[in-house]
Image (cartoon, helix red, strand yellow):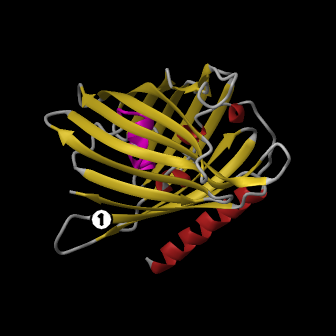
Amino acid sequence: MENLFRGLSKSFSLIFMVLLFVQITFASDLGGYTGTSSRFTADPLAAGTGGITLFHNSSTNSYSQNPAAQAWFDEKSFNAGLVQLSLDRFIYSVNASVPMPPTAHLSVGLIAAGTNNIEARDSRGYYAGDLSDTEMTYLLSFSNRFSEKLAFGLSLKLLTKQFSSDEEWLDLKGSGFGAGIGVIYKPMQGSTFALALKDWNSSYKWKTQDLFDRGSSYQDIFPMSLAWGWQQKFGSTALALEHNHYFIGEDIFRVALIWSKITNLTLNTGLSYEDETIFPGISARYELSWKQGPPMHIDFGIRAGVAGEGLRNYLGWGVNF
């Protein structure tokens, strides 16, 4: 068993290094739209599945992207995670879910993202303090199984974004609402098809009349997308695929392998192809065994960032009861 684990670890590391070496970078139009935090890989499991979020076992934030993903999960759960990023950026996430017998499931969560210590300059180029940019996404997700093969889900989002300064000369807030729907269909044993419409009506609405003489009201719209995915299990291994099509003409493709042959340990490796760039990643979940108390797990993840950024490091913790 030890030799198997060492061999698998070397294989995962080799795949990750090869994918990182062949990473290529260009630009696309998707990065020019608001709502980046909703498209950013935000949890450790997803860091190793290429950002696949349509299935329960591929992301602890799957409830936010595909609200039907939790339909077959019959335990209460709590998860929290953080991402270590360069340039004073941050992402924190927390969520809880509970089954609602006989066939429903309810999840709530929060994803906080932003940037601190942004150096501000006045019109003459002199230092004018530090700025911060904070996005908060409050989530509510409901799913229901209509049969042993089919489930539907609905998610609602309350969105807020704030620009502020440490010396309180700037305080600009935007807010909005959004929604999404999801479907899970299991045509045969070991096969799962997922479909999700994401960020319907999502936007930030701004009013700048109180800050500027020629202020105005305007709206930043999130790019809506339609995502589909397929997961196929082969014993202790699962292959997962996802295609996310944005209605602005952009596409993201993802593929991942999930391996859980060793007791209490799950290993993931995958990649995404977005902005004409390959982003590889790996992640692991270790379940802690206690004689008393609910089962806990610790998640670790590493994902390549854009060129020059380096690696993004993920850490998470959770409990099922």
Q: Position of residue 54 (x, y in %)?
A: 45, 38
Q: List the residue tagged with mark 1.
A: 296
Residue at image coords 21%, 33%? 104
Please tell me whether residue 67 belongs to the stretch shown in magenta: yes
Q: Nearer the viewer, residue 247 or 281?
A: 247
Residue at image coords 61%, 42%? 170
Q: Which residues are magenta?
A: 56-68
Seen in the picture, residue 304 relative to 250 is either above or below; the reply is below
Question: Going by the image, does 80 lie left or right of 148?
Answer: right
Residue at image coords 54%, 36%? 242
Circle 1: residue type: Met
Where the C terminus falls, by quadrant? bottom left
Q: Position of residue 178 (x, y in %)?
A: 45, 26
Q: Position of residue 229 (x, y in %)?
A: 50, 34
Quadrant housing residue 65: top left
Seen in the picture, residue 159 relative to 247 is either above or below; the reply is below
Q: Nearer the viewer, residue 125 or 53?
A: 125
Q: Position of residue 94 (x, y in %)?
A: 38, 51
